[in-house]
């Protein structure tokens, strides 16, 4: 075989090899996506609110349009939207009258019908596929807070409730936000030391009493909190009593500051 022939033969075998490789890769990709395809056929993702099939996001376009995303102007402290723009840095009457232990709170959406359905589905119906979408919206709403933070701490469940529900929805949201904002999630630092009654149906003062002393940073976890700027993560903020009790516990453990980022907050309509 001449040198030229040898080169041609080597070229053609290289071509053959690369074609074979492409064919095998295609097979591999097809095989790898088979279970997913099978799952998609068996269980199409349904819109969490209206149950229409949707592609990926968990909420269809019509239900997405019904959500009220919270945008400025809002109270610099509590994140409550203002009807009129009073100028930068202005605080709501509520923030002045009874300032919370935390520094700032931000929420992605108002707690209305679709938001409530999303929160319930994540919490009670195993719709963990909603966490990436909800976490992404939260990361956008909390951009300023996350930019100043050292770590994220999800509001903990009492271990009894964590067992029956299998996982902590705030922890799932914190993991999504931690990944996108490159912040560590410190899941073990804050403990719910006693089970609390559901806050639903309680008055503002009853809510505060219900969670008083319910959270604690055990001495062995204090170093995970001390001197750090913390963003507390939760799904819903109603009266703020739960996150306020958490913030107090973290500040007692010498956190440098505590901000709050939730998926949804109740906004009283005037
Ligand atoms: Zn829908």
Image (cartoon, grey):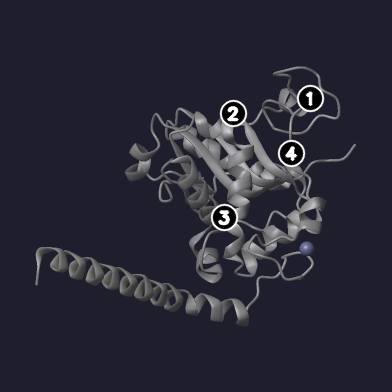
Residue lying at 43% horizontally and 40% vertically, measured from the top left: 183
Residue lying at 48% horizontally and 42% vertically, measured from the top left: 152
Q: Which residue is mark 1?
A: 93
Rendered location of residue 249, percent (x, y): 50, 39
Q: Residues within 10 Å of mark 4 (few under 14, many from 20)?
A: some
Mark in front: 4 vs 1: 4
**Left or right: where does residue 216 sit relative to residue 118?**
left
Q: Which residue is mark 2?
A: 103
Work out whether residue 62 or residue 7 is closer to the camera in this orientation and state it. Answer: 7
Q: Earlier in the sequence, mark 3 or mark 1?
A: 1
Q: Are marks 1 and 2 in contact (CB under 8 Å)?
A: no
Q: Residues within 10 Å of mark 3 (few under 14, many from 20)?
A: some
> From what the image shows, is residue 13 above or below residue 171?
below
Mark in front: 3 vs 2: 3
Rendered location of residue 238, percent (x, y): 72, 46
CA gap, disc 4 and disc 3: 19 Å
CA gap, disc 4 and disc 1: 19 Å
Residue lying at 83% horizontally and 41% vertically, measured from the top left: 268
Q: Residues within 10 Å of mark 2 (few under 14, many from 20)?
A: some
Q: Earlier in the sequence, mark 1 or mark 2?
A: 1
């Amino acid at each position: 075989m001449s040198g030229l022939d040898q080169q041609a033969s080597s070229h053609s075998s290289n071509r053959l090899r690369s074609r074979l490789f492409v064919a095998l890769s295609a097979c591999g990709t097809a095989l790898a996506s088979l279970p997913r395809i099978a799952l998609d056929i068996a269980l199409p993702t349904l819109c969490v609110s209206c149950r229409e099939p949707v592609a990926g996001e968990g909420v269809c376009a019509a239900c997405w349009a019904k959500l009220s995303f919270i945008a400025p102007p809002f109270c610099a402290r509590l994140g409550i939207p203002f009807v009129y723009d009073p100028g930068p840095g202005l605080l709501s009457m509520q923030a002045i009258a009874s300032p919370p232990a935390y520094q700032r709170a931000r929420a992605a959406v108002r707690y209305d019908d679709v938001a409530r359905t999303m929160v319930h589905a994540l919490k009670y119906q195993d719709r963990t596929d909603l966490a990436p979408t909800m976490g992404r919206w939260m990361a956008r709403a909390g951009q300023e807070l996350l930019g100043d933070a050292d770590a994220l701490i999800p509001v903990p469940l009492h271990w009894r409730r964590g067992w029956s529900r299998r996982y902590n929805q705030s922890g799932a949201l914190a993991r999504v936000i931690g990944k996108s904002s490159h912040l560590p999630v410190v899941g073990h630092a804050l403990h719910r030391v006693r089970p609390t009654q559901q806050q639903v149906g309680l008055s503002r003062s009853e809510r505060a009493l219900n969670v008083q002393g319910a959270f604690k940073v055990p001495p062995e976890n204090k170093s995970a909190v001390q001197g750090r700027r913390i963003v507390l993560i939760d799904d819903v903020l109603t009266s703020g009593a739960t996150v306020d009790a958490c913030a107090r516990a973290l500040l007692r453990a010498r956190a440098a500051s505590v901000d709050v980022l939730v998926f949804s907050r109740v906004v009283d309509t005037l």
